[in-house]
Amino acid sequence: MPSLKICSILLLLVLTSGVVSAAENPDLIIKQNNCKTKMGLACSREVFISIFYTGAVTKKCCGELMVFGKVCHDAFVKKTLEDPLYKDLSESTIAKKSIQTWNTCASVIDISPSSFARGVISPAENPELIIKENNCKIKMELPCAREVFTSIFKTGAVTKKCCGELKELGKVCHDAFVKKTLEHPIYKNLSQSAIAKKSTKTWNTCASVIDISPSSSA
């Protein structure tokens, strides 16, 4: 396995070149999702080490990873695995570690209503702005959007197909839509903490059932 110094250099190259996702061209995905601006170098390195070496991710960096989003996260992993430096690594092992890192962070990040103001759920106060900047409206079809909405604001399960669309939507868009809905007068009598918990449950349940190995993300 390459030295940590070499890996750090590679990480810098990845950060500056653009990178992942559910498409063949990771550079295009990174550009479309503004991935290069969503995570600081320190936390990028921490997440990288947790996947390609051994180490834990702090709560602070887990917060940055959630803002970074699943699409960008998968893109960095996929881009790294395509590099000749990593040709001897087991893709299935790295995929499992990538899933573990993401799911662990998703389970420890506080996404209660008060955390919106701290920037844990999203990088900005205005959900409308987040939705616009991240092109959220085009990332999920209406049937699945309705299914996810029902699971959070009413009662119901999310199918594996719609879980897949939710993962493509990304955590930032997911949280922004939930926050936007909670701001509507129709929902003023709902318990925000209860909705936040159901939102977390829906996200984590989908994260646990969707196959995000390199073969399924191409």
Image (tube, helix red, strand yellow):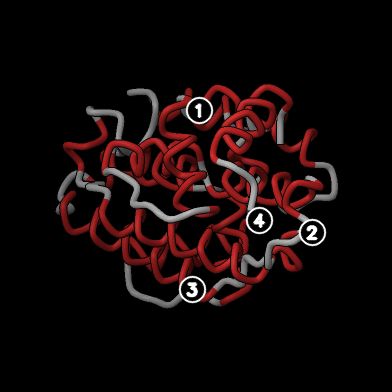
Q: Using the image, tell me which numbered label, if any, was put on residue 141.
A: 4
Q: Nearer the viewer, residue 46 or 209?
A: 46
Q: CA distance from mark 4 to mark 3?
A: 14 Å
Q: CA distance from mark 1 to mark 3?
A: 28 Å
* Mark toward the start of the polypeptide (4 vs 3): 4
4 vs 2, front mark: 2
The answer to whether 190 appears left or right of 93 in the picture is: left
Disc 1 vs disc 3: Cβ atoms closer than 8 Å? Answer: no
Q: CA distance from mark 1 to mark 2?
A: 22 Å
Going by the numbered disc 3, the residue's amino acid type is: Val
x then y, percent, for residue 198? 28, 63
* Mark toward the start of the polypeptide (1 vs 2): 1
Going by the numbered disc 1, the residue's amino acid type is: Lys
* Mark toward the start of the polypeptide (4 vs 2): 4
Regarding mark 3 in the picture, which secondary structure is present there?
loop
Q: Residues within 10 Å of mark 3 (few under 14, many from 20)?
A: many
Residue linked to disc 3: 158
Vertical comparison of 110 with 88: above or below:
above
